[in-house]
Image (cartoon, rainbow, N blue to C red):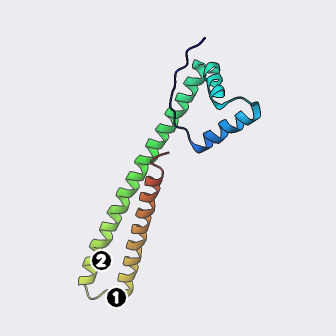
Amino acid sequence: MVKLTRKLITITEQQNQHLNTLSAQTGMPVTEIIRRMIDNSNEVNFKQIVESNDAKLAEYKKVKASLKYYIYLLNRATNSISQIEKRVSSDSKLDYETLNVLNLIKQQLSDLRGDVDEYCKSNTNK
């Protein structure tokens, strides 16, 4: 008789549903399906999975670096507008419409920075 070992694994809800569907279709318990998947896997399949994950990780790192750079640019633009705003407010020759436009641009940049930050946070765990 073969000795069995327990393993506790964590899977996504989608993976769990998939296993349950396979179990219902085949009449086999989920544990037997997992065992058969392991028994029928081979080194080539594993290498493909690892390479696919490595490619996804590399792409994620590129996107993350790009987002950090965009945040940097947004911060610089916001700071520049703040400096312009200070100089303009001390110069009484410029009208309030110009100040309002600068404030609007500053607010839009701030909103965009917030959107980028939120996107980064929501995609960190993917």
Which percent across, then down, holds residue 45?
Answer: 60, 23
Observer-nearest of 121 and 87: 121
The correct choice, above or below, for 85 with respect to 43 in the image is below
Query: Which mark lies nearer to you, 1 or 2?
Result: 2
Which quarter of the picture shows residue 29?
Answer: top right
Residue drawn 71% across and 38% down?
A: 21
Observer-nearest of 118 and 88: 118
Residue type at numbered disc 1: Asp
Observer-nearest of 41 and 65: 41
**Badge 1: few (under 14), some or many (20 or more) residues near its Cα, within 10 Å?**
few
Q: Secondary structure at mark 2?
A: helix
Q: Which residue is mark 2?
A: 85
**Badge 2: few (under 14), some or many (20 or more) residues near its Cα, within 10 Å?**
some
Which percent across, then down, holds residue 87?
Answer: 25, 78
The correct choice, above or below, for 68 with respect to 10 in the image is below
Residue drawn 65% across and 42% down?
A: 17
User: Viewed as shown, does residue 70 lie left or right of 52?
Assistant: left
Residue drawn 43% across and 71% down?
A: 108
User: Viewed as shown, does residue 60 lie left or right of 28?
Assistant: left
Q: Which residue is mark 1?
A: 95
How far is the residue under mark 1 from the one under mark 2? Answer: 12 Å
Q: Secondary structure at mark 1?
A: loop
Which percent across, then down, holds residue 55?
Answer: 51, 35
Q: In the current view of this chain or complex, which residue is farthest to the top?
A: 1
Q: Quadrant of the N terminus?
A: top right
Residue type at numbered disc 2: Glu
